[in-house]
Amino acid sequence: GDSVTQMEGPVTLSEEAFLTINCTYTATGYPSLFWYVQYPGEGLQLLLKATKADDKGSNKGFEATYRKETTSFHLEKGSVQVSDSAVYFCALGGSNYQLIWGAGTKLIIKP
Amino acid sequence: NAGVTQTPKFQVLKTGQSMTLQCAQDMNHEYMSWYRQDPGMGLRLIHYSVGAGITDQGEVPNGYNVSRSTTEDFPLRLLSAAPSQTSVYFCASTGSPGQPYEQYFGPGTRLTVT
């Protein structure tokens, strides 16, 4: 069945460092892909999405490109801030409007 | 709009007790779901509903019941609490026109079963 694999965390970076969080997927067809973010003590919220191959989703300085050839949707940011510390979830759109979730990657940014 | 609201925020139960976690949304979304979040295990779907009167099981439904009598409300009932149900529970809704997968999450209920 469909699945999502994310790099394990925690990922610890210094402020202004470059961020990559890897996400790969297994699916039949070409599902929509998503990144959600969960700040401490809160629910998840949509960060960005891409609905077809080669689409680039972007928001708040974060970007991810839908790569059909490598079945990947890696999350990147050029210069992270302490306020980016959160858990990041990669997901793909399945049947019945369900999302198939990765396990989440905790990001810690040190000042 | 309040979005998705959940009550209570925190709850402690003894083994064998029952309780209902409340979830409501004011966005007129058809699709609602309940997840549990455990350390290192991401989100697991418990039950979901595609509209009033229609519910179905997710990945981990055992020990939980749901009903959907209105579009707005989707309560989750724990029938006989067990320590294995200690978790953070999230309710989510989706169904904005043209955005079928954009899920809106509530703030969560942190449940401890002793």
Image (cartoon, coloured by chain):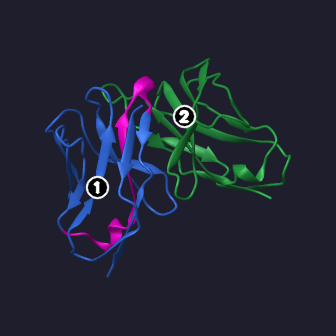
Chain colours: A blue, B green
Q: Is residue A73 above or below residue B97?
A: below
Give me the residue at 84% from left, 54% from top. B14
Residue at mark 2: chain: B
Give me the residue at 61% from left, 31% from top. B73
Check if mark 1's residue and mark 2's residue have beta carbons within 8 Å: no
Residue B51 versus residue B15: which sits nearer the camera? B15
Q: Nearer the viewer, mark 1 or mark 2?
A: 1
Residue annotated with mark 2:
B33
Mark linked to residue A22: 1
Residue type indicated by callout 1:
Asn
Residue A43 versus residue A19: which sits nearer the camera? A19
The magenta segment: A79-98
Residue at mark 1: chain: A
Categorize mark 1 by other alpha carbons within 10 Å: few (<14), some (14-19), many (20+).
some
- Image coordinates of residue A61 in percent, x first then y, are 20, 59
Residue A78 versus residue A54: which sits nearer the camera? A54
Q: Quadrant of residue A75?
A: bottom left
B2 within the magenta span? no
Measure the C-alpha gap from mark 1 to mark 2: 27 Å
Q: Quadrant of the C terminus of chain A?
A: bottom left
A96 within the magenta span? yes
Give me the residue at 50% from left, 34% from top. B26
Q: Is residue B5 left or right of residue A7?
A: right
Q: Is residue B70 visible?
A: yes
